Amino acid sequence: MLSKLLALMLMLLSLSQSAVDSYVNEMNLGGYLFLVNRTYSVSSDYEPADLTVPRVKGGGENTMLRWEAAQALEKMFQAAQEEKGYQLVAISGYRSYGKQFLIHQRKVQNVGKKAALRVSAPAGCSEHQLGLAMDLGCKGSMGLTERFAKTPEGKWVSENCHRFGFIIRYKAEWEEITGYAYEPWHIRYVGVEHATRIHQLDIPFEYYIAQLRQAQYALVKEKYAGKE
């Protein structure tokens, strides 16, 4: 992992200050690199202005995404069908703060608070509120379970979703970093450029964001070195 982070840092430092700055600017709610987890949460009144229903199997009120992410999802579903004959199904997209609260409370009641925190985000701590995350299923595997990873469709998504700007957000080996259990069905839109890098390096989104921040700091420090 250390070698991967070093490779990413060197790559980022090879970019111009303006390029790195533009990436860092995407870390706010207006961009696609905003980090949401139990440390970085979303306010209760946040709702994306450009939510739309993607024209895919399963698409409906519960599967809304931001416009660019919805367009990318449509392209990914189409490619899966054309390249392999796979029919992916959209299950859950945008979730309001209130809906997150209800889902999490229900999970706490069913399995207890500690267990619930591994598999369910407290209100404001879910990427779904960004309108950039989608839970997927496929014919014969509609439930949100780890079985999705073993299906041909799930394997195709894992190997190809970066081509359309998505990443597999919660891998099994990253649980201590992301704070959430393995979710092979959960994809997150970050744009093709960033998704490709994250896929190639095979690192958690948290690490990618941390390296961007460090690169910006390093470039600023270098720029002003000796000027005091």
Image (cartoon, rainbow, N blue to C red):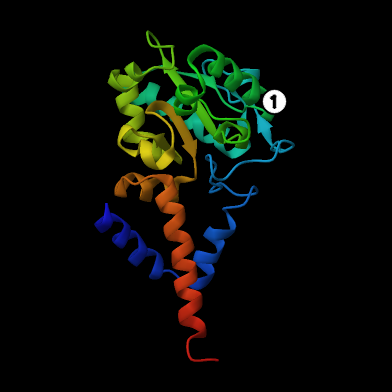
Q: Residue at x 57, y 54 (%)?
A: 26
x and y, in percent, of residue 48 in the image? 69, 38
| Quarter location, residue 62 | top right
Q: Is residue 120 left or right of residue 163?
A: right
Residue type of the residue flagged with mark 1: Gly
- Lateral position of residue 37 relative to residue 195, left or right: right
Q: Position of residue 77 (x, y in %)?
A: 45, 25
Task: Kindly identify the residue that appears in the image at 27 percent across and 51 percent down.
Answer: 1
Judge by depth and name the residue closer to the eye, 34 or 152: 34
- What x and y, as percent, mark residue 142? 43, 11
Label 1 residue SS = helix
When asked about the image quadrant of residue 146, the answer is: top left
| Pointer 1 local density, CA inside 10 Å: few below 14, some 14–19, many at least 20 | few
Q: Depth check: 10 or 152 in front? A: 10
Residue located 54% across and 70% down the image: 18
Asked if residue 225 is positioned above or below residue 40 in the image, the reply reads below
Residue under circle 1? 98
Residue placed most toward the observer, 174 or 147: 174
Q: Which of the image's four quarters has the C terminus?
A: bottom right
Residue at 30% across, 62% down: 6
